[in-house]
Image (cartoon, grey):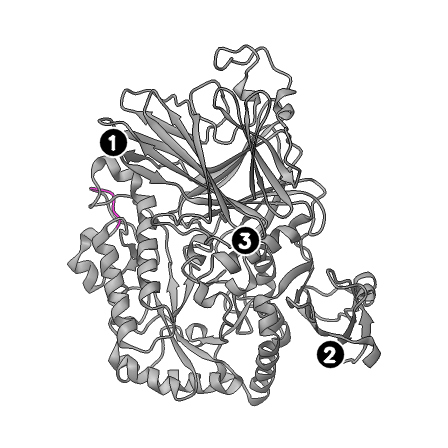
Amino acid sequence: MIDIQKNTTGQTIFYLTTKTASLVLLVTESGIVLTPYWGGRIASLDIAYVTGEITRASYLADADGQKDFKLEQLPQIYPAYGYTDLRGPAFAFLYADGSRTTDLRYVSHRICSGKEKLDGLPALRPSQDCQTLELRLADFVQSMEVVLCFSVFESHDAITQSVRVVNQHKTQSVRMEKLCSANIDLMDCGFDLLHLSGAWGRECHIRRRPLEQGTQSVSSARGASGHGHNPFAALVTPDTDEVHGEVYALHLVYSGNFAVSAEVDMHQNTRFQIGINPFDFSWLLEPGQSFQSLEAVLVYSGEGLGRMSQIFHHMYQDLLIPERFAKQERPVLLNSWEAHYFDFDGTALTALAAEAAGVGAELFVLDDGWFGKRSDTTSSVGDWTPNEEKLGGSLQELIAAIEEKSLAFGLWFEPEMVSPDSHLYRRHPEWVIQAAGRRIEKSRDEYVLDLSNPAVCEHIITSVGNILSQNHVRYVKWDMNRNLTNLGSTYLPAERQQEQAHRYILGLYHVLDTLTQQFPDVLFEGCAGGGGRFDPGILYYMPQMWPSDDTDAMERLAIQYGVSLLYPPSAMECHISESPNHQVARREPLETRSAVAMWGNLGLELNLVRMDRAEKAALAEEIAFYKKVRPLVQFGDLYRLKGLDGGNQYAWMFQSQDQKTVFVSFVQIQASPNTVSKRLRLRHLDPDAWYRIEGSGAVRSGRELMHIGLDTGKIRTDAYSRRWLLTRVDRASC
């Protein structure tokens, strides 16, 4: 809901209110837009006193010639560079005359139902109750217009923000050197900075540290959102855990270079920003041209991280994931990679598929090695022509053989890369990212195609589209195995070379948008195990993603916990892998590998042909159980019970939307001597309801389950797991 008030001094106040939160904007008499409040929902009242009561520091520069008007002490919604605020700006423009000062003033506003689609960019779709406020600001000296767009999703309890910049000068260009999607000034600094960090194989680990004076930031300059940091950060009060404390969260709908920062100034205020990474970024804005920023999602929670996660999960499930798949159950798949790597033929694949069907899999995915002369990493990427000799016939013949076993067929691609040893590279060496006059360095024996070049994008659309149109492929695993180095484009002119990283992502979005519209029934899965791109931008086109190349169950616990802070379980593909594990050589029982993989969309990545009859029977039982709880896992409400401390125990539960079914999992990584069984307490149950525990037949009240809990049993082994399925029952029938 958006409400407007005018106070007695002529100031305009905008109240952006969701189910539990309020963001308040105040336009001063001189047209400066302030942010007096962001937090728990408040009534629409004149809160200009919040900024009016700030004690002024005499040593700071005045603004508007007013001695008591100190911009550096005031909370602003989109602070400029070069005027009288010496904190980090939300944007920076370089003008044709060499000046860098911008002074934005309020001109007008517009309120409308819904929200407009962002041109060329992923963004949340409007909900039925969505309203959008557009604030038009202008610098009249430099003829610049900046439009701040706030979309309020009342029922989903969140706000999105984006920015549109228009160069209204008739003859002069402007160079943008920084452009945040959101800026929030908070008049406090008593927060911890919480973010998701890691590396290849250990992505999205939760990191937390107290703010101190200065700037704390996380970012990526890899050409992708990256393994190192997710495009997210939250300011949390020191007492914040899963159920308590305040959370101020920013998440960027983007897949490229980003930066998020928290600057604590000398007056103990915090400036919180997120947007495209200004490092090695500039954009030349010609006269009359506009530039659209990325969309940022703003979430406030007064009930800890658990409530924050619920908001993100429901919002992304309903408004970001492609509608065709948002409420569709995802198939149990078997991926061929760990079974065969590059060493396979048609006979081996059909044998593996037969075993997959036998244990209950629904989709067979042929991973790397099916095209060109591909037998290792050194050749053929870019030559998307099936190797019929290796496959023992045409790709469609192989697909038909797989489908005869009642399995759908999926295929691996890496369209953004090219092998030096490929027909494509020999035809078009100018199509790869390269710094003029310098050697092109390889990673994983590959170069990166320059998606800032429209011709490259159209080639990818055509080559992938040909395979999908000529063969009955129901699923695509879209990999991205290296980042952007040796930046440089043979396509872009010299003055636009620093636009390349962003233009690359815009090109990628064009490719994905085109292909997903051409093939709306194909389930696309993002896989950036090598390059790291698990973010809302990809989720807009691909309803599920591969969180990490590390398939070890114990390692996945921290990864999946971190991913689940932001992304719904249906977005997370989780596989039961080989034991000993191919990444860390750890041995873990099937039931534990299965328990961890049931945190999201269950898949298989192992050689079933080598398994004995008893192992396959046990696996079939696990898959049958998963299918029973699959709607609950993929579309229920997730509550994390243990693991925020990154310790030895993890536990989580799913509750169906109708609150009739509950699925609980518990895992302990290492056993300890001389221990006794403990109890796991649940959350968010109806205290007066009764629940039957499958297997034992015991009936417990919700109050008992939340205050007393479930017995985890005597733990005697490493990689120990337990699971419970609870069904709500009528006490009278027990």
Tags 3 and 2 touching, CB below 8 Å = no
Cα–Cα gap, marks 2 and 1: 68 Å
Magenta stretch, overall SS: loop
Residues rendered magenta in the picture: 433-437
Nearer the N terminus, badge 3 or badge 2? 3
Q: Secondary structure at mark 1?
A: loop
Q: Which amino acid, by three-letter code, is at mark 1?
A: Pro
Q: Amino acid at mark 3?
A: Cys
Q: Which residue was labeled with disc 1?
A: 287
Crowding at mark 3 (Cα within 10 Å: few <14, some 14-19, many 20+): many
From what the image shows, is residue 628 above or below residue 478? below
Quarter-wise, where is residue 554 in the image? bottom right
Separation of residues labelled 3 and 2 (CA atoms): 33 Å
Q: Which residue is mark 2?
A: 694
Circles 1 and 3: CB atoms closer than 8 Å: no
Which residue is tagged 3? 204
Q: Earlier in the sequence, mark 1 or mark 3?
A: 3
Q: What crowding class fits label 2: few (fewer than 14 Cα within 10 Å), some (14-19), or many (20 or more)?
A: few
Circles 2 and 1: CB atoms closer than 8 Å:
no
- Number of the label disc, if any, that sits on residue 410: none
N-term mark: 2 or 1: 1
The quadrant of the picture occupied by the N terminus is top right
| Whole-number angstrom distance, CA of label 1 to CA of label 3 | 42 Å
Image quadrant for the C terminus?
Answer: bottom right
In the picture, measured across the screen, residue 550 lies left or right of residue 104, that is right
The secondary element bearing badge 2 is classed as loop
**Quarter of the view holding residue 162:** top left
